[in-house]
Image (cartoon, helix red, strand yellow):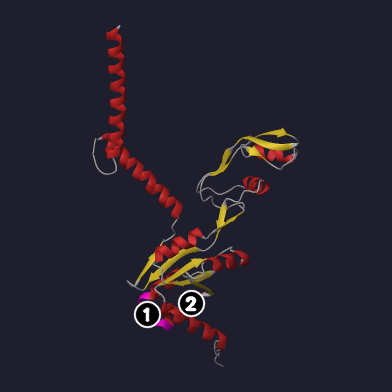
Amino acid sequence: MSAHKHAPAPEKVAHVKAVAARMKKYRTILIASCRSLPSKQFNDIRKKLRGHADVTMMKKTAAVRAIEATGNVSLKEIEKHLTADIAFFFSDMEPFELSALLSENQIPSKARAGDIAPENIEIQPGPTDLVPGPAISELSGVGLKVAVKEGKLEIIRGAVVAKHGEAIKENVAAVLGKLGISPMKVGFLPIAAFDSHDGKVYVGITINKEKTLDDMRENIRKAIGFAVKVMYVNEQTVKYFLAKASMEEKAIQIIVNKNQGENKQ
């Protein structure tokens, strides 16, 4: 007796057709992981993106069917990047611009043991709402120096409790939670995107806009410093040379005035 496959439910077929239509309509199709993203945060971010991108959740099987329904061979390249807990974004923004927008709309979250620190996590000195007791040894255990002031604990010397790229230890996560510090961010993590303008799939498109801008500012600062050092004159360095010349002129004038005063004596 041969086994018969059940036909997909009509509503599922309609959903696949609707998604395929959106894949044809928009410039960019971006897939992002939404693993461990609570439903409230999902809806909050979704609202923030309204007007910029449409988002829908899809299971891998349904996503493959939608991609096949488009008849776009180039789009099939994105199938290899499909995993569980995937969200599809449809937008007329270019892929990297959309990825940056997703990064900007992440929400702070508490750290859990085993989470990877996205940057150096530093606890700064200052007052806390914690009372003396077990909390003293807990805070001291992560490298903080504390004192009791007006019945509450105050951190008088802070510390980096987790370095960038390291797994956050259980005691560190507990201390961060007690201090109300949320160093993690939850949101959609871009995995890959298809750009219909050039028919290419881009992978590794996660963008930290603030970090990128900070890096650019630092590189510009270093470049200007080097240009000044080698006496290279351009629109950016000329003000430094003018300022230096003005200071030297004032210094010379002070010396001249001093010498003239001595000669008169």
Q: Position of residue 3 (x, y in %)?
A: 55, 90
Amino acid type of the residue that numbered disc 1 sits on in the rendered structure? Asn
Q: Residues within 10 Å of mark 1 (few under 14, many from 20)?
A: some
77 above or below 11?
above
Quarter of the figure that contains the N terminus: bottom right
Q: Position of residue 63 (x, y in %)?
A: 48, 77
**Which segment is the magenta one?**
69-74
* Residue 80 sits inside the magenta stretch: no
Say which mark, if any, is on residue 223: none
Q: Earlier in the sequence, mark 2 or mark 1?
A: 2
Q: Nearer the viewer, residue 59 or 2?
A: 59
Residue 93 location, quadrant: bottom left
**Residue ID at (43%, 83%):** 69
9 above or below 182?
below
Q: Secondary structure at mark 2?
A: helix
**Residue ID at (24%, 42%):** 234
Q: Secondary structure at mark 1?
A: loop
Q: Position of residue 72 (x, y in %)?
A: 37, 80
Q: Position of residue 105 (x, y in %)?
A: 52, 60
Residue closest to the far front: 264
Residue closest to the far bottom: 1
Cα distance between the residues tagged 2 and 1: 13 Å
Q: Residues within 10 Å of mark 2 (few under 14, many from 20)?
A: many
Residue 262 location, quadrant: top left
- Label 1: which residue? 72
Quarter of the figure that contains the C terminus: top left
- Label 2: which residue? 63
Amino acid type of the residue that numbered disc 2 sits on in the rendered structure? Ala
Answer with left or right where residue 129 lies relative to residue 223. Answer: right
Residue 134 location, quadrant: top right
**Residue ID at (59%, 68%):** 43
Q: Nearer the viewer, residue 152 or 247?
A: 247
